């Protein structure tokens, strides 16, 4: 996640005059990858494989689907039956779905047409294809090239990588994004901060100093985030923001955010809970409905609302404001401050209580109190119509706030998950932290053929306590920590550490656009996944999410590594097996033609 030492610094907005210089300033690694880009339907130039030895650790590399030098030398066994890999083909998508932007669980046109109602945004929710699951590949947009490096990417991206100009015209008066030559440029504006997001962030801290960006307030949820400039510029304050929005008529806003190198996730609050734990975010910025946002807001946390009902005086705005006053009182949120900036844009900030006294003293039990946690992670779980009480300690005291950032990163401030009966000891937590610190410094950084300077968006596909992300905290990158829904529920601990993440099932597609991550990391998850879904389906989803020229790192037993290695070679990845427990694979630009060749 965001570095505690301001790794986002130096990302000040670039003027149009800088654009030609930026185009020529790609890193040597990226320039080399772009120069050797393979056109669709073209096979790699060679299928030869090379085997070498470094410090007695056997490494094999290759670009073809054959066994080659890997043989039995790496695994120590003889010949084994290869994984059956079907010929790869490009995805066939429904009407009004852009093939290069295909997300199987969000672009299931057949399932959406069969919905009985879309009143509650059901058509924006997940509807994953049933058997057979997706085994196809997503094409590249014409003219695609590797993203600009961070922090330049915060202010500009290649137009051809996300060729969707609708927002330029639709939001032109709000300074969201504009097109300049081969680039989209992001001036830092927004619906409620047309004068600039930096001024808006500073204004919030001025009217409520106790928010203490980057020390007291570390994790933020930005709902209906636009192009995520609010979260992008909070990185300068050592704040990590999960920016969410649906895949809807606001074309590609989450894709813009991820292309910029800003944490973002496709989500809608329709009929199901968000895939986040109870009481997880320090701050929530905008969005509705409040009952679900109250669930994921940490007790003592702040809800920042900047919308026209706060500062305009018309009948509709006044009705909305009065309704907001009634609702926030009913859920016991306290109004901390209401103010206007120099542009007369209003902000109101509420605080969630830390004890149960207000809830039990309400004259009307509306909304009703929830009877308790259902014991399950919020994965495909219907929204609550009740109010979740803050958890109390055994002494009856209110829910305590984590210690200040960055100290909270290394403290296990939750002994158990609210959504799980599993208890996690300090000893397990400390052992996990020590293990990942050692692996990153001694193996991942020094032995893997990964260009860490080109990596910005990272995903840990089986995050555990978040130790992998915590060990990378001083690097200019961020990590999406994914806790599989059927694994021990450690996501509350991850949020308490000041990191971010989601629940997911890796037998289904992830809520992100294609080509949005520079490094995918999976540790000891593949065996359990292979019991429920085909390894080819898993590889297809990895390929969809990963950017060309970037890396997938697998830690597992040698049997699972061999199986995944063969599948990735059939996709023309360059692979290396190391220490009999790691597979490092680099994605190529290869795509099959219409015949699958």
Image (cartoon, grey):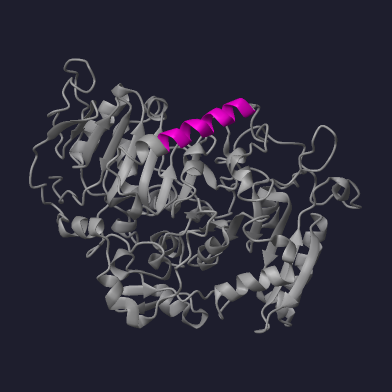
Q: Nearer the viewer, residue 58 or 233?
A: 58
Q: Position of residue 94 (x, y in %)?
A: 32, 55
Secondary structure predominantly adopted by residues drawn in magenta: helix
- Residue 158 figure quarter: bottom left
Q: Quadrant of the C terminus?
A: top left
Residue at the image point whose x is 48% and y is 41% from the top: 471
Q: Position of residue 350 (x, y in %)?
A: 75, 62
**Residue 288 is at least partly visible in this image:** no
Q: Is residue 544 magenta?
A: no
Up-down: is 235 above or below 319?
A: above
Q: Nearer the viewer, residue 18 or 306?
A: 18
Q: Position of residue 93 (x, y in %)?
A: 30, 53
Q: Position of residue 162 (x, y in %)?
A: 34, 65
Residue at the image point whose x is 14% and y is 31% from the top: 51
Instruction: Say whether residue 506 is left or right of residue 543.
Output: right
- Residue 259 figure quarter: bottom left
Up-down: is 276 above or below 580?
A: below
Q: Nearer the viewer, residue 227 or 359?
A: 227
- Tell which residue pokes out farthest to the front in this image: 55
Instruction: Say whether residue 58 is left or right of residue 167.
Output: left
Write down the region rendered in magenta: 426-440
- Residue 30 figure quarter: bottom left
Residue at the image point whose x is 68% and y is 61% from the top: 212
Q: Nearer the viewer, residue 593 or 408?
A: 408
Instruction: Say whether residue 146 is left or right of residue 320.
Output: left
Residue at the image point whose x is 88% and y is 52% from the top: 364
Q: Is residue 427 magenta?
A: yes
**Residue 435 is at least partly visible in this image:** yes
């Amino acid at each position: 996640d965001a570095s505690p030492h301001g790794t986002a610094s130096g990302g000040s907005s670039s003027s149009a005059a800088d654009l030609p210089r930026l185009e020529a300033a790609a890193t040597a690694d990226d320039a080399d990858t772009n120069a050797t880009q393979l056109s669709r339907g073209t096979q790699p130039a060679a299928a030869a494989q090379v085997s070498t030895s470094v410090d007695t650790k056997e490494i094999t590399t290759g670009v073809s689907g054959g066994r080659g030098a890997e043989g039995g030398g790496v695994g120590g066994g003889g010949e084994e039956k290869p994984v059956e890999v079907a010929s790869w083909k490009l995805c066939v998508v429904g009407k009004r779905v852009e093939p290069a932007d295909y997300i199987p669980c969000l672009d299931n046109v057949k399932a959406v047409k069969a919905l009985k109602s879309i009143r509650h945004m059901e058509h924006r929710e997940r509807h994953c294809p049933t058997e057979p699951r997706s085994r196809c590949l997503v094409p590249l947009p014409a003219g695609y090239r590797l993203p600009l490096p961070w922090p330049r990417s915060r202010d500009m991206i290649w137009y051809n990588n996300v060729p969707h100009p609708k927002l330029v015209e639709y939001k032109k008066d709000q300074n969201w994004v504009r097109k300049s030559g081969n680039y989209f440029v992001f001036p830092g504006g927004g619906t409620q901060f047309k004068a600039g997001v930096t001024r808006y962030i500073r204004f919030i801290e001025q009217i409520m100093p106790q928010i203490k960006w980057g020390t007291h307030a570390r994790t933020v949820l930005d709902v209906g985030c636009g192009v995520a400039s609010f979260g992008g510029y909070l990185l300068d304050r050592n704040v990590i923001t999960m920016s969410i929005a649906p895949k809807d008529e606001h074309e590609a806003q989450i894709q813009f955010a991820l292309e910029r190198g800003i944490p973002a996730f496709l989500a809608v609050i329709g009929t199901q809970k968000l895939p986040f734990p109870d009481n997880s975010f320090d701050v929530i910025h905008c969005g509705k409905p409040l009952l679900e946002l109250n669930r994921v807001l940490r007790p003592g946390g702040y809800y920042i609302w900047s919308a026209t009902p706060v500062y305009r005086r018309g009948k509709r705005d006044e009705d909305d404001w009065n309704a907001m006053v009634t609702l926030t009182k009913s859920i016991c949120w306290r109004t901390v401050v209401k103010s206007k900036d120099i542009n007369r844009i209003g902000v109101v900030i509420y605080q969630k209580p830390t004890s149960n006294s207000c809830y039990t003293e309400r004259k009307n039990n509306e909304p009703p109190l929830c009877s308790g946690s259902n014991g399950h992670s919020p994965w495909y779980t219907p929204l609550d119509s009740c109010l979740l009480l803050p958890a109390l300690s055994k002494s009856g005291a209110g829910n305590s706030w984590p210690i200040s950032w960055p100290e909270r990163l290394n403290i296990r401030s939750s002994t158990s998950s609210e959504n799980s009966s599993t208890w996690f000891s300090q000893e397990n937590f400390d052992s996990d932290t020590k293990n990942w610190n050692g692996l990153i410094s001694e193996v991942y950084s020094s032995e893997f053929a990964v260009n860490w300077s080109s990596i910005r968006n990272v995903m840990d596909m089986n995050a555990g306590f978040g130790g992998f992300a915590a060990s990378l905290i001083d690097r200019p990158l961020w990590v999406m920590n994914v806790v599989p829904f059927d694994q021990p529920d450690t996501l509350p601990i991850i949020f308490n550490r000041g990191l971010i993440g989601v629940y997911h099932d890796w037998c289904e597609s992830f809520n992100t656009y294609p080509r949005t991550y520079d490094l995918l990391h999976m540790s000891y998850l593949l065996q359990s996944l292979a019991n429920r879904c085909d390894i080819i389906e898993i590889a297809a989803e990895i390929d969809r999410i990963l950017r060309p020229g970037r890396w997938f790192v697998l830690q597992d037993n040698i049997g699972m590594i061999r199986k995944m290695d063969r599948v990735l070679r059939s996709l023309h990845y360059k692979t290396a097996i190391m220490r009999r427990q790691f597979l490092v694979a680099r994605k190529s630009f290869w795509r099959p033609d219409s015949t699958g060749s």
